[in-house]
Amino acid sequence: MGTPEVIGIEQKLIVGVGDMAVSNNPNLVLTTYALGSCLGIGIYDPVMHIAGLLHVMLPDSRIDAGRATARPCMFVDSGVPLLIRSAHELGAARQRMQITVAGGAQIMDHTGVFNIGKRNLQALSELLAQNSLQIVASQVGGLVNRTMSMKIATGSVTLKVSGQPQEIPLWTP
């Protein structure tokens, strides 16, 4: 997890690739860049004002057990449970969690041989279904990179999509 960058009265906290951040600090804006085939997964509890943002790269940690142990946030199957547990430890309730997702594009795989973005989305959908959790908003797939930002004070999520001049809203509770 990076060091917050001060922006006016808000602080921007950058969530790197294969990393996550969870907080109840209303002055933080969680941001992750370079969501191509990777997924940005945001969770928000609107009652407790607890938010988390995860940047996963791959669907299944079984491909590299050592790396999964050292960096569980790299994988959907190990990162998402860690994100939910971390938010729960701050007081978030699973039944109130609003889940947003961006990314899952087909980047640098124009023939679709590896389908990493699609596989990430499938793994996430299956994991959420097994845990009776639903996505409230998403912008996934396609051929573009995205930046995802979440304001902890409000739970609102915005995206900056490559090729578009300004941020667009994804979710406002």
Image (tube, rainbow, N blue to C red):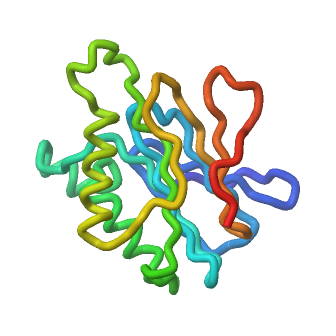
Question: Which of the pair 73/162 is nearer the observer?
Answer: 162
Q: Can the viewer see residue 36?
A: yes
Q: Residue furthest top?
A: 111
Question: Which of the pair 122/76 is nearer the observer?
Answer: 122
The residue positioned 43% from the left and 79% from the top of the image is 94
The residue positioned 47% from the left and 47% from the top of the image is 40
Q: Quadrant of the C terminus?
A: bottom right
Left or right: residue 124 compared with residue 156: left
Relative to 33, is 18 above or below?
below
Residue 107 lies in what quarter of the image? top left
Relative to 24, is 42 above or below?
above
The residue positioned 73% from the left and 69% from the top of the image is 153
The residue positioned 25% from the left and 50% from the top of the image is 123
Q: Position of residue 85 (x, y in %)?
A: 37, 75
Q: Can the viewer see residue 21?
A: no
Relative to 9, is 112 above or below?
above
Q: Position of residue 135 (x, y in %)?
A: 45, 60
How many marks overall? 0
Residue 57 lies in what quarter of the image? top left
Left or right: residue 121 compared with residue 52: left
Q: Position of residue 108 (x, y in %)?
A: 37, 17
Q: Position of residue 157 (x, y in %)?
A: 65, 54
Question: Which of the pair 37/171 is nearer the observer?
Answer: 171
Q: Residue furthest right?
A: 8
Left or right: residue 151 compared with residue 69: right
